[in-house]
Amino acid sequence: MSLMELRQVTKSFGAIHALNGVDLKLEPGEAVGLMGDNGAGKSTLMKIIAGNFPPTTGEIRIENKRVHFTKPIDARENGIEIVYQDLALCDNLTAGANVFLGRELKRGIWPFRKLDHQAMNTRAGELFGELKSETRPRDLVKQMSGGQRQAVAIARTRLSEPKLVLMDEPTAAISVRQVAEVLNLIKRLKDQGHAVILVSHRMPDVFEVCDRVAVLRRGTKVADKKINDTSPEEVTGLIIGAIQAA
Amino acid sequence: MTDNTQTPQDAHDKTVQTPSIDHAAIDESITLRQEVSGIGAILRTQPFWVFVAIFAIGVVMTFVSDAFLTERNMFNITRNMAFFGIMALGMSAVICTAGIDLSVGSLMGLCAINLALVLQAGWGVEVGFLACMFTAAVVGFINGVLIAYVRLAPFVVTLGMLAMSRSIAMVISNNKMVYEFGPDQDLFEQIGGGSLLGVPNVVWVLTAMTLFFLWVWRYSQWGRWVIAIGGNAHAAKLSGIPVERVIVSVYMVCSMCTGVAAFMFIGYTGSATNGMGATYELNVIAASVIGGANLMGGVVYALGAPIGAALVELIRNSLLLAGIPALWQQFFVGLFLILAVLLEQLRNRGGK
């Protein structure tokens, strides 16, 4: 049984067809790289899975049950967590506060119910530890490096033990040293049994951490191959259209 | 002769290495930064430095005027600042979401008139208080809905509300002053104007509300959400925080703080006019900003509101006692406002 399955997903914005009948299947613990040129439909597909908007036609199935997402919370409730490209962190809060943003732990009885800072920081510390990141829960996010910020965003997704983590260009805006750090974080996610969809422009990243690569071109999936059965050259050809399909 | 042993290859390496920046070291120094705790954290806050300024002005004033440190004068200063302090507590919440509420001054007038008319009609103090708070809640709700759901700019919405509330207050009161407060008149004026243990009642109210907001900003989920929205509203939304509902509640909280201030203020002055609270919004915003609220949002201190209000009132009082013409008052309030913002800018630059 597949973890998540997209069947013939189509999305049109008026006369523009962003996606034409895309199928995509994911097994538990599998990492799939989603590649394509700008405008190929990567972000549209991401946003459909993330629940930002529903597909025009086609269906999303999670563990063989059809689901309907209309807002990001719906996706989260179905075990899909998203790491956004801008990370969606509040700079003015601590790392621990960001991990628990929107689902704070509380203790005591109403009306004296208060935030349990201790428990949240302890749990956040454990999550950072599992990711082998040196991020400290009480530090302000404002003062963190790109790699640490990624760790915070990724730790946040682990809070609910999600089935699938969606990552949008996690290595786009950080230094080379931090890229290695982030790729390690992704491997940790896989080790812990989470399926990962990695949207990226960077060929080396996809080939390092993913088991499979899916290529989109002009809203159509033109290839879906095991990493071992393909090569960066072939994928590049597929992305730019030099190779029609594989 | 070490220079001679250097091969051209070595020299080449050197020229490549020299201009490169040691990113690892930069990363390291960023990693070593952390949230300062204890005394260090207090030293970094705006309210602390404003408090130092208040203390300094106080010390100077004891030499300038014998009347300054009298019980009578302290009583007056704390009472006068308390009205602004209560309003600034709510204003700080609004400013924390990167919003602004210009309507608080007019709202005070509207609350005052509604409260006074309800009391004049023969109702008790409790009913008057509820009418006052209800008026405030409705105005705050309208502000909040227009800002959060219709997505109009807070400045424009509350500027419109400033004009509208004042006008409604004039219409309802038929432009007359009210000084008959019905059967509970004595009790009502005792609440607003009286004192307990030598401290004005309104100062007790301010103290209780400040403690409450201290708790809210530190321990409540609502407080955490308001701060998160001020930091990054988009991120807050994606995290599942009901951003629109929280923003509406923030404007209602701000208005209801004004409602409390209006209730106490009318009891203290013993009369209600529809002109009450005119231009107060400027002093309240000044008090909040001097107390450390950042108009870009994401920063709030419960103690900032009373401390900022105290500084504004202290300036007024000091000028008066020092014999400087009252015409200078607004100049100094404005000067300190700009100094406060400048101080914050300097601290931010130093911190990064």
Image: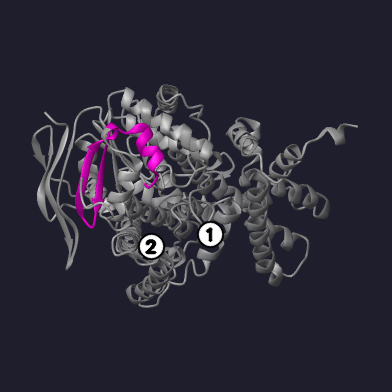
Q: Quick one: SS at disc 1? A: helix
Rendering coords of residue B260 (x, y %): 42, 53
What chain does badge 1 belong to? B
Q: Which residue is mark 1?
A: B284
- A81 lies left or right of B300: left
Q: Is residue A224 magenta?
A: yes
- Give the residue drawn at x 46%, y 55%: B261
Q: Nearer the viewer, residue B333 or B234?
A: B234
Tell me the magenta residue range: A201-228
The image shows residue A16, relative to residue B201, as above or below, that is below
- Give the residue drawn at x 22%, y 48%: A71
Q: Which residue is mark 2?
A: B111
Q: Nearer the viewer, residue A4 or B329?
A: A4
What chain does badge 2 belong to? B
Rendering coords of residue B313 (x, y %): 63, 57
Give the amino acid type for the residue marked by disc 2 in the picture. Answer: Cys
Q: Earlier in the sequence, mark 2 or mark 1?
A: 2
Q: Nearer the viewer, residue A151 or B315?
A: A151
Give the amino acid type for the residue marked by disc 1 in the picture. Answer: Val
- Give the residue drawn at x 72%, y 46%: B55
